[in-house]
Image (tube, grey):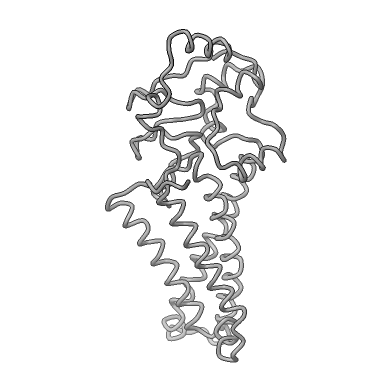
């Protein structure tokens, strides 16, 4: 079940307003100027313009899903849902090779393995990847697959928009008047070009991370993370590319990584 508990406040509203404004501005540039999409629209060939708009709406929908949904916050009541006796707790500790989960120094919750406290969101986030200022939310276990899907769809839109914007530019008669007239389309082209490079890099990085069952935080800060630093294997969660991708995109439930760690890593943290 999808929970909607993304970051709130005026900061989040401003970031999302900028995203919507940039998207609408680029769309205006592509459809108001004599681009390929505008010519097809004028000729009554609406298939490609409608398909392009559908992809834009899909991209915007994924953006708001990732931005507003719960990324995997660790809740206060999780420790109270299934109270266990001292004997059961001892048995559980024995089964997990005395693996001990640390308490967060900020919210004092017992952190599941791979969780980290985000000071921007003021929450501990399961399978924490990073806090993304562009979506004004954390990327964690719940919304990370949607984040990658957003990057992929957004990249398709940008790769389509790039030649469309270029098709509307006429360089045969450059002049100051031409520059003023085509300013919106020029800005649209520059925005699309910059974001295309950014999306290619981000999508490539996150597909690599997903295929190796690791996160940005784990990849960048391995030396600071005890369950990785003290582990005998490089990545105790890596099950191979295909299983990693299947688990990343197709597993809906939250995973208790601490129960898998001893089985794979064979090391006590």
* Number of numbered discs overlaid on the protein picture: 0
Asked if 31 appears above or below 98 in the picture, the reply is below
Residue 51 in the image: x percent, y percent?
59, 74
The answer to whether residue 168 is left or right of residue 17 is right
Locate residue 139, reporting x and y percent. Answer: 47, 43
- In the figure, 218 relative to 48: above or below? above
Q: Quick one: which residue is furthest to the bottom in this view?
A: 43
Q: Quick one: which residue is furthest to the left in this view?
A: 10
Look at 41% across and 32% down and name the residue there. 74
Q: In x, y percent, where is residue 8? A: 31, 49
Which residue lies at the image location 33% right of the left edge and 36% below the top edge?
122
Quarter occupied by the C terminus: top right
Could you tell me residue 199's position as x and y percent? 56, 55
Front residue of this view, candidates 33 and 247? 247
* Up-down relation of residue 100 to residue 142 (above or below): above
Position of 171 relative to 23 (above/below): below
- Residue 16 occupies which quadrant of the picture? bottom left
Occupied quadrant, residue 41: bottom right
- Report the front residue among 145 and 95: 95
């Amino acid at each position: 079940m999808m929970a909607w508990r993304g970051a709130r406040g005026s900061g989040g509203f401003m970031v999302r307003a900028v995203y919507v404004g940039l998207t609408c501005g680029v769309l205006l540039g592509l459809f108001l100027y004599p681009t390929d999409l505008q010519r097809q629209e004028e000729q009554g060939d609406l298939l490609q313009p409608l398909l392009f708009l559908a992809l834009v709406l899909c991209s915007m929908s994924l953006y708001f899903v990732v931005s507003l949904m719960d990324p995997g916050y660790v809740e206060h009541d999780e420790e109270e849902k299934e109270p266990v006796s001292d004997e059961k707790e001892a048995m559980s500790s024995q089964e997990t090779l005395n693996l001990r989960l640390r308490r967060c120094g900020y919210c004092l919750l017992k952190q599941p393995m791979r969780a980290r406290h985000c000071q921007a969101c003021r929450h501990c986030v399961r399978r924490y990847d990073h806090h993304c200022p562009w979506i004004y939310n954390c990327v964690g276990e719940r919304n990370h697959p949607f984040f990658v899907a957003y990057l992929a769809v957004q990249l398709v839109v940008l790769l389509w928009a790039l030649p469309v914007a270029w098709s509307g530019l006429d360089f045969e008669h450059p002049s100051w008047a031409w520059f003023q007239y085509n300013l919106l389309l020029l800005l649209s082209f520059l925005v699309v070009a910059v974001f295309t490079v950014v999306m290619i890099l981000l999508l490539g990085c996150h597909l690599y991370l997903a295929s190796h069952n690791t996160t940005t935080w784990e990849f960048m800060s391995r030396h600071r993370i005890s369950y990785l630093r003290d582990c005998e294997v490089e990545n105790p969660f890596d099950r191979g590319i295909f299983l990693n991708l299947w688990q990343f995109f197709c597993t809906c439930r939250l995973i208790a990584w601490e129960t898998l760690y001893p089985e794979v890593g064979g090391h006590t943290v």
